């Protein structure tokens, strides 16, 4: 974890880890500016998405001109499928929460995939003034809650997660943004994030890169590997949790599924 750098700070941009953190932080500063421009609702959401996307595309073109990019807000250029290095970005994860000041549960995701693996990532939470990245992986603190805590959507928690929580006597903690939910596990705000029902690579690539670097368990809900830079960018389910909870969660899914 690092304190949010200002865009004028000069990290070692030769390091992919440092670049990811700087890009996420810089886009986050831009989003905070957009939030102060007097827009509301859909206008604010759209302005935030586009401002952060344009900034990230410009900075990546400047600092990594030979790399491919997959962005939620950009056209999917299939040249990435033949590329050795692909940046996977979500310029604004949690647009609903972004459009509801002073909510802080929204994020910027920047990840780098290289030859089959996530090799760097950063999740900025601009309203908290913090960026979590593989440049300085979070050290997950000892668990402070007697009962497991599971991060869920504040608007549509999956029914199977409610059943899982009942079985393992867990507390559900609602929040926005997939990235915020994953990072909440590294912060000891929650102990697990279990999701099924729809996401894309940009929703979880950067958070998973950071979570893995922090030593958390990460997989699909059936226990299989999370695979990125695919032709079909749908990646609809995942588990991110403290390692000691992984088998309990996987066993529940094996028995009950996710319906």
Image (cartoon, grey):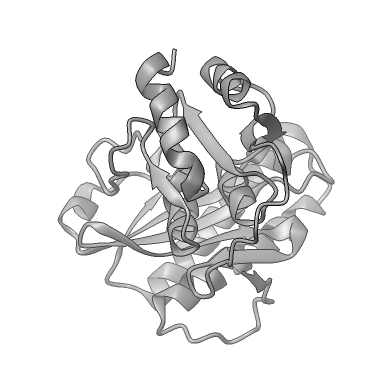
Q: Quadrant of residue 150?
A: top right
Q: Position of residue 223 (x, y in %)?
A: 32, 36
Looking at the rendered image, the quarter that the N terminus falls into is bottom right
The reply to whether residue 72 is visible in this rendering is no
Q: Residue at x 20, y 62 (%)?
A: 115
Looking at the rendered image, the quarter that the C terminus falls into is top left
In the image, 74 versus 19, the foreground residue is 19
Q: Quadrant of residue 212?
A: bottom left
Q: Residue at x 41, y 15 (%)?
A: 256
Q: Position of residue 5 (x, y in %)?
A: 67, 76
The reply to whether residue 226 is visible in this rendering is yes
Q: Residue at x 45, y 23 (%)?
A: 197
Q: Position of residue 102 (x, y in %)?
A: 84, 46
How many numbered marks are there? 0
Q: Position of residue 108 (x, y in %)?
A: 58, 55
In the image, 45 versus 245, the foreground residue is 245
Q: In the rendered view, tell whether residue 25 sits above or below residue 81.
A: below
The residue lying furthest to the left in this view is 82
């Amino acid at each position: 974890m690092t304190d949010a750098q200002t865009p004028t700070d000069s990290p070692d941009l030769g390091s992919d880890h440092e670049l990811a953190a700087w890009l996420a932080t810089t886009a986050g500063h831009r989003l905070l500016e957009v939030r102060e421009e007097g827009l509301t609702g859909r206008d604010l959401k759209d302005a935030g998405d586009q401002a952060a996307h344009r900034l990230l595309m410009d900075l990546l073109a400047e600092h990594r001109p030979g790399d491919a990019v997959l962005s939620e807000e950009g056209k999917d250029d299939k040249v990435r499928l033949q590329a050795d290095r692909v940046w996977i970005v979500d310029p604004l994860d949690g647009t609903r929460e972004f459009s509801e000041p002073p909510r802080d549960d929204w994020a910027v995701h920047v990840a780098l995939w290289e030859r089959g693996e996530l090799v760097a990532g950063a999740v900025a939470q601009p309203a908290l003034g913090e960026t979590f990245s593989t440049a300085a992986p979070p050290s997950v603190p000892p668990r402070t809650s007697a009962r497991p805590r599971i991060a869920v959507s504040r608007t549509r928690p999956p029914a199977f997660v409610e059943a899982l929580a009942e079985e393992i006597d867990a507390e559900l903690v609602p929040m926005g943004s997939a990235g915020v939910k994953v990072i909440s596990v590294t912060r000891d705000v929650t102990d697990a994030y279990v999701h099924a029902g729809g996401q894309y690579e940009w929703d979880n690539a950067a958070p998973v890169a950071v979570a893995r670097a922090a030593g958390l368990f990460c997989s699909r809900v059936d226990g299989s590997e999370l695979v990125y830079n695919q032709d079909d960018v749908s990646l609809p389910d995942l588990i991110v949790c403290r390692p000691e909870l992984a088998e309990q969660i996987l066993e529940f899914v094996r028995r009950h599924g996710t319906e």
